[in-house]
Amino acid sequence: MTRKNKQINWKKNIGTYIVSQAITQLGSSLVDYSIIWYIVMETKSSVLMAIAMVCVFVPKILISFYSGVWADRYNRKLLLICSDLMIAAVTLVFGILFYFGYTHVWIIYLILGIRSICTGIQTPVSKAIIPMLVPSKELIRVNGISTTVDSVIAILSPAAGGLILTYYSLDIIAFIDVFTAIIGVAALSQIKFSNTGEDVLSEKTSYYKEFLESLKYLKQNVIAKKFLLLYLVVFFLAVPMILLTPLKIARLFEDDVWRLSLSEMLFGIGGITGGIVISLKKFEMNNYNLVCFSFLMIGVFCFFLSLPFFSVILIAMFIISFFISFSNSITIGILQEHIESNYLGRIFSIIQIFSGVANLVGFVIFGIMGDSISVDHIFIFTSLAFIIYSVLAYLKSNRT
């Protein structure tokens, strides 16, 4: 095969892959946002929102102890297809229950938990597949494109979810998710590639041993460890922006669902812009300082979320999203480049575990605080913490 044909082939494969995942994620995202809007508008309680987040994160954390090993041991494409279909099946059951009037909160929490398990399997696998399809020098740019697509979905999902939820119940959106999952899986099945770039794990090795081996590898991989330690605190500090911004808008402007949708749309547009910037320009793979600068900007504009002006909140969410997308694309590309192929699934599952624990602790703490103290004070605290942490991380990196 000529060099030109190889280039066309990998571009076709990664294009099909990104499209297949975009289709399935669109349907799933519609359900996720609709459930969030439903809980927010029905309860306006950060505690109940926090419980929902616990249902999202705890199962994902627990399954991650196994999903990373599965991603490095079994066929990654098959795992991804199975997890997509399982999410669709669970969502179908949810839609049927909701259609017949079973709208109890505990059912919503249960469905969130089961979907979380499937997502916990899906996430490390999807991250590990990209380096198998893309040349290493193109990883950051491809991740920028992937992030852009994710951001487009982030725009469409809240808008469409809010619109459908205004006129229809959650069961309609659930059935849409099933339809998009079938289309996405059909597209994914057309891509042909080997399971891993290196030898797969032996099935005779215990999960415990393989997990410990991946921790040892992470400890020895200086770049991966550096970025993971940096993000541990960031995962925690990002929680108020995720959890409390919709609640503030709901409390400040009462039942205007369109405001929630618009705020999420601006958040998505910011992510698109960040992804486009990454995909159009080549950045150095070790640009740690650029990531620290992104966190500094997130901290600065998090302060503006504490103000009672809807237009200011929208601008802040756009800029925060831009720098989240920008820094994430760089970081994922760096990790994919510097982690060996047969460790990718396990390392990304470890990242999922650590981020899930940090998020979970944050949701519990800030969920309780959000019903007892001013959310504006929480935003100010988060802003200061982000700024101080990014400066300290930058100074420490440049001293070593």
Image (cartoon, grey):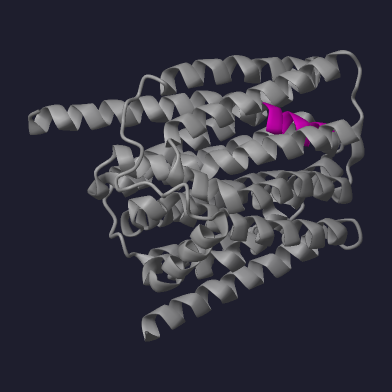
Q: Residue 270 location, x and y as percent? A: 51, 43
Residue at far left of view:
2
The front one of 278 and 52 is 52
Vertical placement of residue 309 versus 11, above or below: below
Q: Quadrant of residue 239?
A: bottom right
Q: Is residue 138 left or right of residue 147?
A: left
Which quadrant is home to the C terminus? bottom left
Residue 194 in view of the camera: yes
Closer-to-camera residue (318/353): 353
Location of residue 301 by image quarter: bottom right
For image coordinates 85% across by 50% down, the residue present is 46
Tell me the magenta residue range. Answer: 31-38
Residue 323 at x, y percent in the picture: 49, 54
Residue 32 on the magenta segment: yes
> Residue at 45% of width from left, 24% of height from top?
20
5 horizontally vs 378: left or right? left
